Image (cartoon, rainbow, N blue to C red):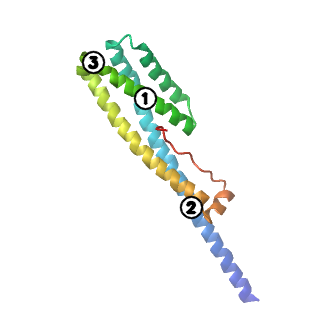
Amino acid sequence: MVLMAWIAGLLVAAVAIWAIIIYNRLVRDRTRVLSAWSDIDVQLKRRHDLIPKLVDAVRQYAAYEQATLTTVTELRAEAARTGDVAQLAATEAKINVGLQRLIALAERYPDLKADRNFLDLQQQISVVEDHIQYARRYYNGAVRNLNTRIDSFPDNLVARGFRFHSADYFDPET
């Protein structure tokens, strides 16, 4: 009888240790997702800070291209208001298109293409776009790991018990 109680105690302890390990892994993965999202957010804010400067530089040379300039400015404001990852991804995709149009406008204006301020802004935008791409890859990898753990047996038992939720991927290219 004592042996059965001892075995039952060991079994309960093993299950408790297993649940603690799984819970800690889920917390680690969720923290990675939040940290990775913070990195994306920083890069998006950097890009959003550069947009008005780029718009002003282009505006000086291409006053009649107002529609493109207005669209990019409005999309920047919309992105700042968006909290949902999927909505933000869609808005950021539109911003990418708008920025490409702004850069393409420079081709029509040789003076703008040669303007040092514009060239610096263009370079800064390019660097920020690279950082966004790297941050997005890391974030999506962290999301994949968390979602896999939440959906995998036996981790899903602990995940459900502690109300862990799947995270959304950030893909502004779709």
Give how far across and how far down residue 79 sits, in percent: 51, 29
Query: Badge 1 is on which residue?
Result: 97
Q: Residue at x 44, y 37 (%)?
A: 42
Disc on res. 61: none
Mark 2 Cα shell of 10 Å, populated few (<14), some (14-19), many (≥20): few
Q: Nearer the viewer, residue 140 or 9?
A: 140
Viewer-nearest of discs 3 and 2: 3
Amino acid, disc 2: Asn
Query: Badge 2 is on which residue?
Result: 24
Q: Is residue 29 above or below residue 54?
A: below
Mark 3 vs 2, N-terminal side: 2
C-alpha distance separating marks 1 and 3: 20 Å
Mark 1 vs 3, N-terminal side: 1
Query: Badge 3 is on which residue?
Result: 112
Q: Is residue 48 visible?
A: no
The picture quadrant where one finds residue 27 is: bottom right
Mark 3 Cα shell of 10 Å, populated few (<14), some (14-19), many (≥20): many
- Mark 1 secondary-structure assignment: helix
